[in-house]
Image (tube, rainbow, N blue to C red):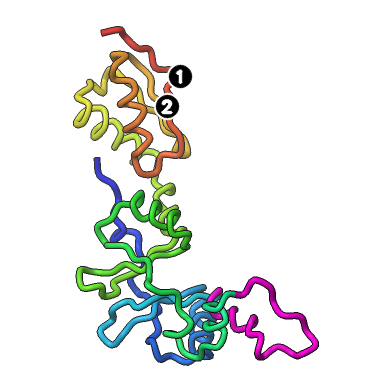
Amino acid sequence: MRHRRISELMTREVVSVRGDTPFKEVVRALRQHRITAAPVVDGENRVLGVVSEGDLLRKTTDRSAAPADLPAVPGVEAWERAKAAGTRAEELMSAPAVCARPDWTVAEAARLMEVQDVKRLPVVDEGDRLVGIVSRRDLLGIFLREDEDISREITEDVLDATLGLDPRALSVAVHDGRVEVGGRAPYRIIPAIERMCSTVDGVVSASYRWLTASPD
């Protein structure tokens, strides 16, 4: 089975800023390119962190800049106040950056995004140099695969090559990413069929209620 790699989905032309980029220049870059965050890199294009709209908006929580007659913003930690006082990208960014590698699968990147609660991952090479960026939207792109491609992969790679089943004894129907398998297969193979079909890129759901199994 072939899983799509991050190198196939990532954006290669990445808008990044240097660590010494002034606050207003960062805001201008995000607005000009209609993005919500940008990697912060050093002179050798190594990723130092990521600066987002959320990081920049902490400037509005700067208590020292608030009028005296306004109440202080509750729950603002010291590190948030430090960011609010920052004037350069390296002072405003979230660091260290949570990054991915080009050879990762969609599942690996999605798992890291979920665990770290981030919306995007800079993609770096072995030297931690920026080569791309991948977002949640990019990862969702695998669900735009054509049904015919999914059906072909399940038939050829899952049923035939991996499980050693005769594809002629089974039917594979795919509609909008929903898989239905029918035919005859040994009971002991059914869990493997279900599990492996569900992991094929682009599969939304897998249904086997039409599968007539043999006890062999």
On the image, the x and y values in percent for residue 38 come to 43, 76
Q: Nearer the viewer, residue 150 or 132?
A: 132
Question: Is 200 above or below relative to 208?
Answer: below
Residue occupying the point 26% across, 75% down:
129
Residue 72 drawn in magenta: yes
- Which residue is located at x 45 percent, y 54 percent? 114
Numbered label attached to residue 152 = none
Secondary structure of the residue carrying tag 1 is loop
Q: How many marks?
A: 2
The quarter in which the N terminus is drawn is: top left
Query: Farthest residue toward the top?
Result: 215
Name the residue type under label 1: Arg
- Spot the residue most to the right: 69
Left/right of residue 159 with respect to residue 74 in the rendered view: left
* Whether residue 128 is situated above or below residue 43 in the rendered picture: above
For the C terminus, which image quadrant?
top left
Foreground residue, 77 or 114?
A: 77
Residue drawn at the location 43% of the way across and 64% of the way down: 120
| Mark 1–mark 2 CB contact (< 8 Å) | yes
Magenta extent:
54-76
Where residue 24 appears, x then y in whole percent?
53, 90
Q: Which mark is residue 180?
A: 2
Vertical placement of residue 64 versus 178, above or below: below
Residue 43 position, x and y percent, is 28, 88
At label 1, counting other C-alpha atoms closer than 10 Å, the crowd grade (few under 14, some 14-19, many 20 or more) is few
**Direction from residue 153 to residue 207 in the image, left or right:** right
Using the rendered view, name the quadrant where residue 194 is placed: top left
Q: Of the residues shown, which amino acid type is indicated by label 2? A: Glu
Q: Name which residue lies at 48% across and 59% down.
A: 117
Give percent across and percent down for residue 87.
Answer: 51, 91
Report the Cα–Cα distance between label 1 and label 2.
Answer: 8 Å
Q: Which mark is residue 209?
A: 1
